Image (cartoon, rainbow, N blue to C red):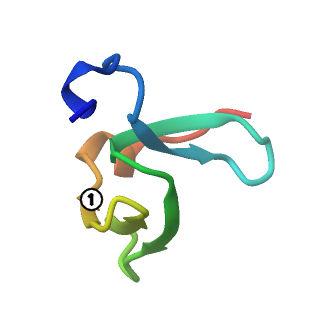
Amino acid sequence: MDVTTTSTRIGKFEARFFHLAFEEEFGRVKGHFGPINSAEFHPDGKSYSSGGEDGYVRIHSFDPQYLEFEFEA
């Protein structure tokens, strides 16, 4: 009953992506209403799936800009 009366920020869990070597965040994806328990990338690298305590498995496809991005060191 309190879900519709809470702040819009509460309950918005997001997956955050970091560069492995430089430890800098380069992306965020919102979607889950509870903590994310697992994430798995597709072998082709163009999508990933995440599962959370909200009971949903979400399948995310990366935008073309993600695939063209080059990290400058």
Q: Residue at x 25, y 66 (%)?
A: 59
- Residue 54: image quadrant is bottom left
Pinpoint residue 40: horizontal percent, then vertical percent. 46, 75
**What residue is shown at x 67% (from left), y 47% (from top)?**
19
Q: Name the residue under label 1.
A: 60
Which is nearer the eye, 48 or 35?
Answer: 35
Above-or-below relation of 52 to 3: below
In the figure, 46 relative to 44: above or below? Answer: above
Name the residue furthest front: 1
Task: Using the rendered view, name the quadrant where residue 53 is placed.
Answer: bottom left
> Is residue 63 toward the left or the right of residue 51 in the image?
left
Q: Image quadrant for the C terminus? A: top right
Q: Is mark 1 on a helix, strand or loop?
A: strand
| Residue 16, picture quadrant | top right
Q: Where is residue 28 in the image (x, y as percent from the top left)?
A: 45, 37
The residue lying toward the viewer, choosing from 62 and 73, is 62
User: Which quadrant: the N terminus?
Assistant: top left
Q: Where is residue 13 in the image (x, y as percent from the top left)?
A: 44, 41
Q: Which amino acid does label 1 sit on?
A: His
